[in-house]
Image (cartoon, helix red, strand yellow):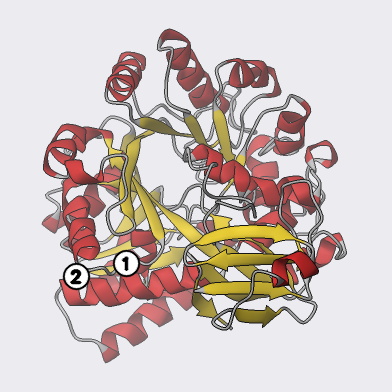
């Protein structure tokens, strides 16, 4: 069916000015003046009056964990609670209303907003849940707190050796990095009916923010099995691209070959994900210069150099893209050095790139590395970065401005469920660089509204190798569109985060409407 959009503002990202746009089925068929586009209309054409609203390309998620968002919808949320007492009261209320001895997962925890920034402890959880296994997941998704029953179920004792790239603090219940991630993998998933309902809700959340293409940041064998089921049952209505946990690559490639580098019912497996360090707000990011006020502490690595190089070689041989989680500049250095030794990689991505050094940008450009900045860190964690890193380093968190000056293509993401997949808030962060406490963090790293929009549309399409079919409004491309209530190129910069998505359209069909 043909649709024609008129009487609005159009942001095409094709360096043109148009008055109307026509789609047919899942494609854009023509853009141009109102008169010439209306000539395409026939008796069955739907004419859509934008009433002064703005039509633009839909957003493309450069990095997140959509299934983790679905899981979080089935868990207890303590997001926004600012004291241990509030957390304990919330958990105690849940216990009284829900008698269970099954695993309880709590999300949304952020010790950085607690009054003294100290973690809740295993002992405090034991007081409420002496017989039920509980894990509280930090909002960063890089650490968590387990109670004694959880340690018992996970076979963690006082003598358990720390895994490589992780730490177990047995006395307090704190699990860091691989110790935490490995523990989550051992917890049984909910029933498939619950998963399907939650996954649908998660997709609707993405669509409500104008996103038509999402990422599954890391899949294991178990999760690949679930995605196959969701795909076979036609339960995926966004495009979802997944990246394999490097440990499971051979098994997933063999068992799920039909998804490798090609969509089946909106799902495909695009490559491999590795983790090279942790997070700066949890002080587990791997740095070249020590953390402020801790002159001997630099965070720590997750993987050895030779292992990184071997995985890159394997990804090259298999024509698989590599995504490397690098928050610290030492982790970025490790990744860059590995890429120098393995040429011909398929659009390698540096995920987060929070402390990517300005001196490292020439190599990023030379070796065609795509930094995907978690730019919203500036608002959500900027104040803690000043404390942990000092103002000089904190000002260059997510160096988008410096990257732009060197003609480096970059993308933005939210690492959902760390934060909501709110693209206009992300654009606002990139343009204004304001922290929660209202501090300006890095005037020189600000970018224009147009460049920020590109980072979540055409640049993200390029990251996935889909720039030929997505990311701009052009004849022949997918009819993946959004209608918004204000033109982001014309609003005041501080109003960007208040722009409302009115409709999200994928393949020519409305998948979300306000």
Rendering coords of residue 500 (x, y %): 68, 75
- Residue placed most toward the observer, 439 or 354: 354
Q: Secondary structure at mark 1?
A: helix
Rendering coords of residue 180 (x, y %): 30, 48
Rendering coords of residue 343 (x, y %): 43, 12
In the displayed orientation, state which residue is furthest to the top. Answer: 341
The residue singled out by tag 2 in the image is 190
Locate residue 355 relative to residue 50 in the image: left or right: left
Residue at the spot x=16%, y=52% of the render?
A: 222
Please tell me in which quadrant of the rendered image residue 265 appears: bottom left
- Residue placed most toward the observer, 304 or 262: 262
Between the C-alphas of marks 1 and 2, the distance is: 8 Å
- Residue placed most toward the observer, 228 or 352: 228
Asked whether disc 1 touches disc 2, contact meaning CB atoms under 8 Å apart, the reply is yes
Task: Work out whether 193 lies above or below 390.
Answer: below
Q: How many marks?
A: 2
The residue singled out by tag 1 in the image is 71
Locate residue 449 relative to residue 186 in the image: left or right: right
Task: Work out whether 208 lies above or below 369.
Answer: below
Residue at the spot x=17%, y=47% of the render?
A: 221
Tag 2 or tag 1, which sits nearer the N-term?
A: 1
């Amino acid at each position: 069916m043909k649709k024609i959009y008129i009487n609005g503002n159009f942001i095409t990202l094709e360096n043109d000015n148009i008055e109307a746009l026509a789609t047919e089925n899942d494609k854009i068929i023509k853009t141009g003046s109102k008169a010439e586009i209306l000539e395409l209309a026939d008796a069955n054409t739907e004419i859509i009056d934008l009433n002064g609203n703005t039509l633009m390309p839909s957003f493309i998620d450069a990095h997140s964990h959509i299934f983790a968002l679905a899981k979080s919808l089935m868990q207890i949320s303590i997001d926004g609670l600012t004291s241990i007492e509030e957390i304990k009261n919330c958990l105690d209320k849940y216990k009284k209303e829900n008698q269970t001895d099954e695993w309880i997962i709590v999300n949304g925890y952020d010790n950085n907003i607690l009054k003294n920034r100290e973690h809740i402890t295993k002992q405090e959880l034991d007081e409420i849940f002496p017989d039920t296994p509980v894990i509280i997941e930090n909002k960063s998704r890089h650490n968590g707190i387990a109670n004694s029953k959880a340690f018992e179920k996970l076979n963690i004792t006082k003598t358990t050796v720390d895994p490589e790239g992780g730490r177990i603090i047995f006395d307090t219940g704190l699990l860091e990095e691989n110790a935490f991630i490995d523990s989550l993998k051992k917890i049984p998933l909910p029933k498939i009916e619950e998963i399907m309902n939650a996954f649908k809700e998660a997709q609707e959340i993405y669509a409500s923010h104008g996103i038509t293409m999402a990422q599954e940041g890391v899949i294991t064998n178990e999760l690949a099995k679930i995605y196959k089921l969701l795909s076979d049952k036609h339960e995926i209505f966004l495009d979802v691209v997944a990246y394999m946990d490097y440990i499971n690559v051979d098994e997933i490639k063999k068992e799920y070959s039909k998804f490798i580098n090609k969509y089946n019912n909106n799902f495909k497996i695009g490559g491999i994900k590795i983790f090279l360090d942790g997070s700066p707000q949890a002080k587990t990011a791997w740095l070249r210069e020590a953390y402020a006020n801790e002159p001997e502490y630099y965070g720590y690595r997750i993987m050895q150099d030779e292992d990184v190089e071997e995985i890159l070689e394997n990804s090259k041989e298999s024509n698989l893209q590599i995504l490397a989680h690098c928050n610290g500049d030492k982790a970025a250095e490790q990744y860059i050095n590995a890429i120098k030794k393995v040429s011909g990689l398929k659009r390698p991505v540096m995920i987060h790139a929070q402390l990517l050094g300005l001196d490292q940008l020439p190599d990023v450009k030379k070796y065609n590395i795509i930094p995907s900045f978690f730019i919203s860190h500036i608002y959500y964690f900027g104040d803690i970065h000043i404390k942990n890193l000092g103002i000089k380093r904190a000002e260059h968190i997510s160096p988008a401005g410096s990257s732009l000056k060197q003609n480096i293509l970059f993308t933005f993401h939210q690492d959902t469920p760390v934060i909501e997949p709110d693209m206009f808030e992300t654009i606002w962060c990139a343009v204004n660089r304001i922290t929660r406490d209202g501090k300006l963090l890095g005037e020189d790293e600000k970018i224009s509204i147009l460049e920020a929009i590109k980072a979540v549309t055409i640049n993200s399409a390029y990251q996935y190798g889909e720039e030929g079919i997505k990311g701009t409004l052009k004849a022949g491309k997918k009819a993946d569109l959004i209608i918004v209530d204000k033109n982001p190129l014309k609003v005041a910069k501080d109003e960007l985060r208040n722009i409302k998505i009115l409709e999200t359209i994928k393949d020519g069909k409305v998948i979300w409407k306000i």
